[in-house]
Image: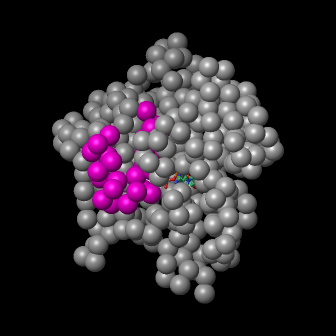
Amino acid sequence: MLQKLFKRGLGFCLMLVFLLSGCESIAPQQYPFVYSGPIMGTSFSIKASHIPEQVNLENLQQLILVRLQAINQRMSTYLKDSELSLLNILPSTEPQIISDELYTVLDAAQNISQLSAGAFDITVGPLVNLWGFGPDIMLSEAPKPEAIKQLLAQSGYAKLQLNNQDLTVTKTLASLSMDLSGLAKGYAVDQVAKVLEEQGIKDYLVEIGGEIRLKGNNLQGKKWRIAIEKPTINKRELEKVIAITDIAMATSGDYRNFFEQDGQRFSHTIDPRTGYPITHKLASVTVLTETCMLADAWATALMVLGPEAAYNVAEQQQLAVFFIIKTAQGFVERATPLFTDYTKVKQ
Ligand code: ADP
Ligand code: MG
């Protein structure tokens, strides 16, 4: 019997916000700027500890919301008229001129695909849908192997070509369809951070669906205290609280968005090499890096690679990563040296 255990991004995000505020001993309403709301099928949450006098808070909210909505309108696979959705349905193998913004994110995605030997691959869009993790209707059972095989043959990041001279993108297969859900939230976090900085704000926390960017200090004048969740399904507990700042953080896991069939868990992270959801023992990956877009993409890429390969790639790429691995004895933690360095100083 198929047991549906979908927990979509919103639940995860609300929990993370709860955890975040739980980690800060100051009530969120004491922050001079707190703003949250729904976006990208999940929610955003922003806090700033200090606001320059000239900043009008209502205008600031408006600037942020307009920016978020514009990004969604470019990159969502849920909005049928987004720039990405229109490119996806275009039955053409001709070069297409796209916005600078969409180009930037597609280019970053392709870069991570190369660095991760194809573990990150935005052309898995049709497979994500086939497995019921896209905008289409959820599944009542796992898809047929033939259907997976067919879509797998029609995907592959090398089938998407970018030209940085004229900012065009070419689908070398007309049916190619891209899914930016693995890094668009991170990009949006970076863009909200940019809006805040343009207003002279230097102490903030920006979070969308669990992907975070931090700058300066919290209201207590200390580094931000951020929780990493234990990758358990029914209970929500903390694995670890870290004090960090001037950095972005993203977590990928197999424990929030999945379904189970006959005791097997099918996660929303698809292995582009097989067309099947990941099945290894890696339960959660947290990446700290300069931009949230890269943290987000790397978290998904490392999640695909599995515990051993992911650790090796993380070390080779000089990434600060924290892994939680399932074993018969329970969860085991592993961190790259850079993650330990970033997090060892408490304040
Ligand atoms: P997580 O926080 O678990 O990484 P994200 O929302 O960042 O979740 O990314 C997962 C989403 O990325 C999936 O829902 C799917 O749309 C897309 N995706 C799944 N597998 C891959 C992959 N191998 N490469 C790129 N994107 C993927
Ligand atoms: Mg991601």
Give me the residue at 56% from left, 80% from top. Answer: 261
Our reading of the magenta stretch's main secondary structure is helix
Confirm whether the magenta stretch covers residue 71. Answer: no
- Near-viewer residue (36 or 340): 340
Residue 192, compared with residue 93, is above or below; it is above
Asked whether residue 178 is in view, the answer is yes
Give me the residue at 40% from left, 57% from top. Answer: 305
Q: Position of residue 336 (x, y in %)?
A: 24, 47
Q: Is residue 342 left or right of residue 182?
A: left
| Quarter of the figure with residue 329 | bottom left
Give me the residue at 63% from left, 67% from top. Answer: 149
Q: Is residue 246 left or right of residue 272?
A: left
Residue 66, compared with residue 243, is above or below; it is above
Q: Position of residue 175 (x, y in %)?
A: 74, 50
- Quadrant the N terminus occupies: bottom right
Residue 204, compared with residue 265, is above or below; it is above
Q: Is residue 25 left or right of residue 135?
A: left
| Quarter of the figure with residue 168 | top right
| Quarter of the figure with residue 315 | top left
Give me the residue at 67% from left, 61% from top. Answer: 151
Confirm whether the magenta stretch covers residue 296. Answer: yes
- Near-viewer residue (3 or 192): 3
Start and end of the magenta stretch? 291-317
Q: Position of residue 16 (x, y in %)?
A: 45, 52
Q: Position of residue 229 (x, y in %)?
A: 37, 57
Asked whether residue 229 is in view, the answer is no
Query: Which residue is at the far bottom?
Result: 1
